[in-house]
Amino acid sequence: MTTPAKSQQQGSWKEYVEDFRRAGHEAVDWIAEYLGRLSDHPVSAKVRPGELFDSLPRSGPQHGESFDTILRDFDKIVMPAVTQWNHPRFFAYFACTGSTPAILGEMLAAALNTNGLHWKTSPAIAELEQVTLDWLRQWMGLAEGWFGIVYDTASTSSMHAIACAREMVAPEARVNGSTPNLTLYTSEQSHSSIEKGAIAAGIGQSNVRKVPVDAEFRMRPDALAAMVQQDVAAGKRPFCVVATVGTTSSTSIDPVPQIADIAEKHGMWLHVDAAYAGVAAILPECRSILKGAERGHSLVVNAHKWLLTPIDLSAFYTRRPDILRRAFSLVPEYLHVQEDPRAHNLMDYGVPLGHRFRALKFWYVLRYFGLERIQAMLRSHIQWAKEFAALVDAHPDFERVAPVPFSVVCFRYKGSDDGNKRILEEINATGRMFLSHTILNGRVVIRMAIGNLATTWEDVHEAWTALQAAAKGKRQ
Ligand code: PLP
């Protein structure tokens, strides 16, 4: 039998590798140049919808192109359509950092292309994930006994929490698909991902109860207790409550210990969404934010928000991995392996089969920065938010609308909603900064979210100067 020859067109692997070596150095130089001069870029993309699409060919290339040509087009065509989330004056949503060690970790993970479906398909993924999530658990001051797994986003993490809650009280739902009368509770300020999780888990939007909040946007435990009581009397089955530590709009902190009391009384699963703020517990002075979470069943903290890791990496912890596994384990014959208590088969703990080596970039981050430098960053951001809040408080044209427990300040120009929107549009149109808005107490509110490692106090102050100038323009 003759071995079929490799076709000419396929190219030689050796040549690809040498081509990569040269282009790889150039790409790293490009990245270093970009990161070093990020401040010179406009923060938000200034393109019309469809502009990038229209400037690229309608069909893919017949013949392969050189790395040089691709990089040139990336620079010329793609970059103008990129909103710069890594920019030091990106103050919108939750500011974040794709840090240098994580970039290298991502590159190595892509090179390995290893897939942690189960332990054997990549022991490194399963075990590095266990190690890094356990380091983070310890830094956040959580007790032992939490099982951690990495998912892509907090939305996915919370969806799994809700599915676990369903599995705990109604295991028959896994088989017959019906979840009659199950009701889930979360505050009116919780993230939309909770409602989406309930949709995905078959609970149904109409069975999600939005619990009212107090004047500081925290879930009211008295209202929660009353709603649960009412539902029980009406024959419903309260099964899950989701508390938020660091809500999306105002970063308020739900009273988790009181919520835990109610959850325990009614046998509900308690999930804590600490996607943004959980990492603040790394600071001993903020540790109390996770008080009560240890009585919960699950917790989500995103490394891709305030922990120096590029999207995506969401750390999901649960004290009931047995239930997570019961909810999701389904092993086809071709994937059967010998059980071993130390070998976690990640495919058993969630919807995805394939499991990316996200832990590698996280390991790079934790090792490269270390606890001290991470704490220093969190402290600066919190301090600058307080100083920014003080400037707002002292200004006659602005008012603050929420407490500032972390690194986000919610405030408004003392004028109409349209006036606030126009101020935002004006300062964002300069390209020098990017802030976003929310609605609190029915009014448009501007959010100043600090969270990028490259940000300086001068950057924060530049935004404040621009805001004052825009507000002055509105008065005249
Ligand atoms: N939970 C909270 C409190 C959030 O603020 C967000 C997003 O900002 C999410 C969940 C969703 O995060 P992800 O994009 O990782 O799904």
Image (tube, rainbow, N blue to C red):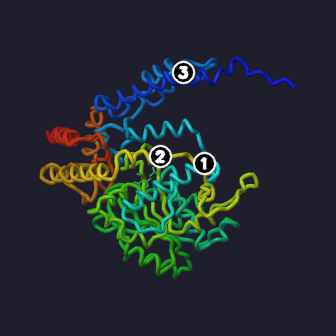
Q: Mark 1 points at which residue?
A: 122
What is the spatial separation of the Cα atoms under label 1 and label 2, in whole angstroms? Answer: 20 Å
What is the spatial separation of the Cα atoms under label 2 and label 3, in whole angstroms? Answer: 29 Å
SS type, badge 1 = loop
Q: Which numbered tag is attached to residue 19?
A: 3
| Image spot of residue 40 (x, y percent) | 29, 28
Q: Is residue 393 above or below residue 238?
A: above
Residue 209 visible in image: no
What is the spatial separation of the Cα atoms under label 1 and label 3, in whole angstroms? Answer: 28 Å
Which of the pair 323/103 is nearer the observer? 103
Disc with the residue nearer the chain's start (1 vs 2): 1
SS type, badge 2 = loop
Tell me the kind of residue under disc 2.
Asp
Is the CB of the residue bearing disc 2 within 8 angstroms of ligand 1? yes
Tell me the kind of residue under disc 1.
Ser
Is the CB of the residue bearing disc 3 within 8 angstroms of ligand 1? no
Nearer to us of marks 2 and 3 is 3
Which quadrant: the N terminus? top right
Disc with the residue nearer the chain's start (1 vs 3): 3
Which of the pair 317/344 is nearer the observer? 344
Question: How many C-alpha atoms fall within 10 Å of the one at disc 3: few (<14), some, or many (≥20)?
Answer: few
Tell me the kind of residue under disc 3.
Asp
Task: Count the numbered circles shown.
Answer: 3
Q: Name the residue under label 2.
A: 312
Which quadrant: the C terminus? top left
